[in-house]
Amino acid sequence: MTEQEAKKRIDDLSREIESHNYNYYVLSQPLIDDYSFDQLLKELESLEAKFPQFASDNSPTKRVGGDITKKFTTVEHEYPMLSLSNTYSEEEIIEWENRVQKLSPTQPEYVCELKYDGVAIGIRYENGALKQAVTRGDGTKGEDVTTNVRTIKTIPLKLKGDFPEKFEIRGEIFFPLERFKLLNEQREELGEELYANPRNTASGTLKLQNSAIVADRGLDCFLYGVYGEKIIAESHSRAVEQAGEWGFKIPSYQKRMIAKCQSIDEIMEFIAHWDKERHHLPFEIDGIVIKVDRYETQENLGYTAKSPRWAIAYKFKAEQVQTELNEVTYQVGRTGAITPVANLAPVLLAGTTVKRASLHNADQIEKLDLHEGDFVYVEKGGEIIPKIVGVNLGMRKDNAVKIDFINHCPQCNTLLLRKPGEAQHYCPNYNGCAPQIKGRIEHFISRKAMDIDGLGPETIDLLFKQGLVNNYADLYELTFHDIVELERMADKSANNAIKSIKSSKDIPFESVLFAIGIRYVGETVAKKLAKHFKNIESLMNASFEDLINVDEIGEKIAQSIRLFFEDHENKQLIERLKNYGLKFEIEEAEGSSEILSGKTFVVSGVFEKVSRKELKELIEINGGKNTGSISAKTSYLIAGEKMGPAKLAKANDLGVKIINEGDFLKMINHPNA
């Protein structure tokens, strides 16, 4: 390679890597997998070593990570969050261990840990209380996501035992696979595009502006790296054990999530074990981290410009198989969203037999350039179903026909629509397309909606085919005889179904609002709408401007609500449900009022007349809003005994009015005032 060719390749690689860095760290939307990215970085490192005259000070090889987003406060790390050297080669692990041996005055010991596929986090504690949580960012600076991190139940707000006065603990926040699957199932029900993988979704969740949504999603965290001015232990493994004693969720020695190793053979055995067993974990890992255990040896080994010499990460290659594409079929969701699915020749992948893979939308089919009979590469990375990541063009037949996305609904033959800015096609035949009708009824009876037992999808299908139900209002006209005469339905089951339908009339308004299936109105949004408008009439008559003035209701949701209630048949359904006795207004709690409307409160400390929980309930009953942290938008801090000095200082700095529980109780005319 000539100098001119090398310079051009270095420039091209630098631009490409920076682009991928931005997509990965800032947008949380990577366009290539980790292996491909690491190969690009290694090529650039190699070229810069051979042609150092072309290595820029701003080269991606000299960076720790990506850019910083602007939505959250940027915080400088007290201890830089350096990246680890990555390898996919066992030979390079052996070479690393040999170097460590040569540079160490004594025989080194190692710790092997799982490399969690999540979001790196650093959490600062002072006097045993959570002070601040900061993302990795570019390694030097990260984003303050303290409010969202506080919602993660496995992260302690207060510590126990003999902990240092000030220290930072680091680890990885991740999305448990079961919670991720549930979230995507909910999005599928709403006709929304599915999230691609748990790692990106965890990253996006941490950057949400609504901590209630973060709390609902159920993120988890392992913490294992302790940093501070004072030495708390002689080794990394002992520091991890101590962190567990203070109340942190640490990797389990019993489950072999962390292990002490004396030799390269033991390191390799740990890697081999988890390369096979990782598919049985309830979360995703993408490799193994090997560290020198003793801190003294770590200090002797030191650092390169961007990573420690005393640690290395072995990354698993994503398991990928090749199989033949038999056909592409199309599913119709309850909102009319059309989802393409690849039907494959059965193939074993990550311990299970795969027959279908997600294609998401028309853009994905176009991007893959799928043809009939293609041999495709399939990966499984936390999705509900596996995904196609590429096509073996060398095996494509000369006469293979390109797959084009359908123009008409596969169920009712209605011409499909695709709105500007949306990824999916929709069938507009809202009241005449069978899968949409049955899907809406199934959603209506679901546990988080009307919670009607005894009527599963098969029973709904039978009721629909026999013309007994054509919408969810028809459920309330069903008789015992209608149900018992269905195939495989016994007297007891029919009785239980009728009782459950009757009991559903006691379900509160916010659940009924969720159940009727307005697009984009999930559980959380339904609660906010019910609380704000109080009854269905007010909501139905609300203008677009009225709707977007509700806390966290955006234009897309507002438009969807208006379209739903402008539909004559939807209004008829609501009227029928009201006549059947369903609840379409908020049942105000005793002593409720709007005295605190528009006011935001933070409750902190210990109280005498009422408990903290009761205080928060009183705030909401009287129209106020609870928040967990103080900001310029906080109206009042209700201060009790033993309140943290930091919270008090912040309230004073921001000019937030501080009151005691007596002041608050007088404010709402409480009898204990």
Image (cartoon, rainbow, N blue to C red):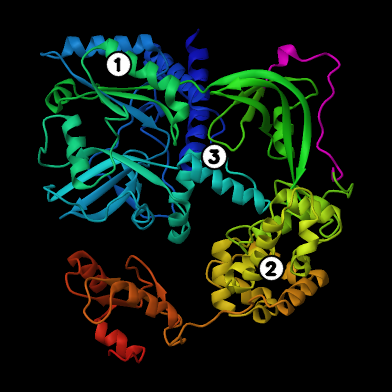
Q: Secondary structure at mark 1?
A: helix
- Quadrant position of the C terminus in the picture: bottom left
Residue 552 x, y percent position in the rendering? 54, 66
Of residues 114 and 315, which is closer to you in this image? 114
Q: Is residue 170 visible?
A: yes
**Mark before the other along the chain sequence, 1 or 2:** 1
The mark lying in front, picked from 1 and 2, is 1
Task: Name the spot of residue 277 as percent of width and height, x first.
Answer: 43, 23
Q: Amino acid at mark 2?
A: Ile
Image quarter of residue 580: bottom right
Does residue 100 sit above or below 466 in this rendering? above
How many numbered callouts? 3
Q: Residue 306: within the magenta?
A: no
Q: CA distance from mark 1 to mark 2?
A: 57 Å
Judging by the rendered image, the residue that carries numbered circle 2 is 561
User: Start and end of the magenta stretch?
Assistant: 391-410
Relative depth, front residue between 345 and 143: 345
